[in-house]
Amino acid sequence: MKESKGVSRMWQLYKMGGVTPALASMLGAQNAQQMAFMRSVNRDLRKQSLLDTPFDDLETVVFDLETTGFYPYNGDEIISFGAVLLKGGEPVEGKTFYSLVNPKRKVPLHITELTGITSAMGEDAPELADVLHDFMDFCGKRLLIAHGSGHDKQFLNAALWRTYKCNLTHRVLDTMMVAKWLQPGRESYGLDELLAEERIPITRRHHALEDCFMQSRLWRTYLGRIRSRNIHTLGDLYAYLSQH
């Protein structure tokens, strides 16, 4: 389908750099500011390397999304964001993020049964663009950590492109990948099984923030084992993983 002249011109202005007055007038002041923020974060991330920061000093964000299904390019949507800030693997007091999202569609019954999020709750929730902006602001330029991160990255990229015409440029470390390295040969690397293995209490699974708390504890456990192998930076870890 051919783009309208207005949309085409807006996209050309966006690609040229900066949020011009013309672009701001097309988008509205708030959306233009949000787009400028997203571009600024992505630009700074391209310049920054976290690889040499010692794990003891490294700030990370463990995050999780709940969604209506598995296919963001076939109508499924994000319904909640959760995130926890860590430094050196330890939680930073008071630094958490949680929000429902209005998916602009009905939440399937089986998803409601899984997450506790109903269609009515979604209808009363903030818009995706606003929550996404606040979530990315919370994440800043930090390393992101997720379990089975492919699902979350796919939805984040779809949401970022649809709302701000940009992609996720953060480094994302997958604790499932780390588990496969630390515990090769397991039958399952699902979060429930790994939590049970490490005797981490399982509470309110499929609640985005509660899942982050549990994943944070799992990461702290793994981080202790990583350090015991004389691996002290993200660069060290990536180099080691590439050889094993």
Image (cartoon, helix red, strand yellow):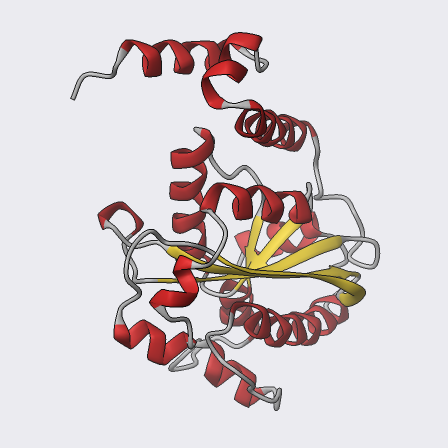
Can you give x and y, in whole percent of width and height, for residue 94 in the image?
Answer: 78, 65
Can you give x and y, in whole percent of width and height, for residue 239 in the image?
Answer: 62, 50
> Residue furthest toward the left?
1
Above or below, comparing residue 236 to residue 160 in the picture: below
Name the quadrant containing residue 99.
bottom right
Q: Nearer the viewer, residue 102 or 46?
A: 102
| Residue at 42% across, 75% down | 115
Q: Is residue 56 left or right of residue 16?
A: right
Above or below, comparing residue 129 to residue 1 in the picture: below
Can you give x and y, in whole percent of width and height, for residue 118 in the image?
Answer: 37, 71
Name the quadrant containing residue 212.
bottom right
Can you give x and y, in whole percent of width and height, for residue 51 in the image?
Answer: 70, 44
Above or below, comparing residue 26 to residue 234 in the picture: above
Q: Nearer the viewer, residue 187 or 114?
A: 114
Q: Is residue 240 left or right of residue 157?
A: right
Q: Nearer the viewer, residue 241 or 191?
A: 191
Q: Is residue 124 left or right of residue 133?
A: left
Q: Nearer the viewer, residue 67 or 27?
A: 27
Q: Pick the quarter of the image with the N terminus.
A: top left
| Residue at 54% across, 48% down | 131
| Residue at 30% across, 60% down | 70
- So how many labels did they put on this image? 0
